[in-house]
Amino acid sequence: MTARADAPVTIGAMESSSTTAGGGSRREATRQKLYEAAVTLIAEQGFSATTVDEIAERAGVAKGTVYYNFASKSVLFEELLRHGVGLLTASLREAAEKTERDGGSKVDALDAMIRAGLVFINRYPAFTQLYVAELWRTNRAWQSTLMVVRQQAVAVVEGVLLDAVAGGELSDEIDIPLTAAALVGMVLVAALDWQAFQPERSLDDVHAALSRLLQGRVSGHR
């Protein structure tokens, strides 16, 4: 698989296929359009410079439709962050659970989560850029929400680390909260660097490099 083997898709595309028929499905489809428009525009020109009118125009809906679904632009962006990080968290959890079903170790699960994170970022690069940028800002109305959803993603990794320590796969001297945050951060930063500066590298290549770091530094294998 190359870095562009799967063309980047919108935040809404993965979720839209899971909606049910009827009015709920139509409303969810509208919200997906708004998420897509917002993440694209804000990535292009920043949150402050992006207007509700522009979001509505990009989504192909009336301005009133934006306010019907979200009370304000800030609420829309807050829900976008919640939605996107929720998808990332779900992909990490599924990677860990699949590894367990397949009989893999907890370190194998961590490695599978690294790959799942890279796949997610490769599919949703604009959202990932926004998410990382927002992590460094402390004056946003949605800061508390961002911290909550970030912790939900990190907690999935923490759970696997706890199980690995309990099972004797990893040393009980590991600082689990910091190690979990470091693993998530490693994937985010490495993936963004890969896309921005080394796009010729394949996803498999990037995953292999991070996997070697995991095996050497966390599990202690050489």
Image: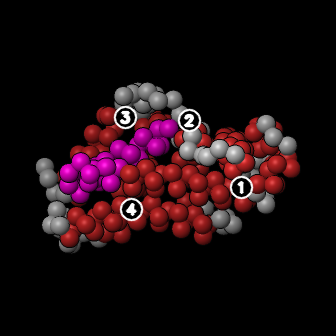
**Amino acid under label 4?**
Val
First in residue order: circle 2 vs circle 3: 2
The secondary structure type at the circle numbered 3 is helix
Q: Amino acid at mark 2?
A: Val
Tell me which numbered mark, 3 or 4, is placed earlier along the sequence.
Answer: 4
Q: Which residue is mark 2?
A: 9
Residue 150 percent location from the top left of the image:
50, 62
Verify CB contact (< 8 Å) between mark 1 and mark 3. no
Residue sitting nearer the eye, 91 or 52: 91
Magenta part of the chain: 95-123
Of the numbered discs 2 and 1, the one sitting upstream in the chain is 2
**Which residue matches tag 4?**
156
> Which is nearer the N-term, disc 2 or disc 4?
2
Q: Earlier in the sequence, mark 4 or mark 1?
A: 1
Mark 4: which secondary structure?
A: helix
Query: Quadrant location of the N terminus?
Result: top left
Q: Which residue is mark 1?
A: 76
Horizontal arrangement in the rendering, residue 55 relative to residue 118 (left or right): right
Q: Is residue 114 magenta?
A: yes
Q: In whole angstroms, how far apart are the C-alphas of marks 1 and 3? A: 31 Å
- Against 144, is 202 above or below? above
Q: Position of residue 78 (x, y in %)?
A: 66, 59
Mark 3 or 4, closer to the camera:
4
- Marks 2/4: CA distance? 24 Å
In the image as oriented, which residue stretches furthest toward the front? Answer: 22
Label 3 sits on residue: 203
Q: Quadrant of residue 208?
A: top left
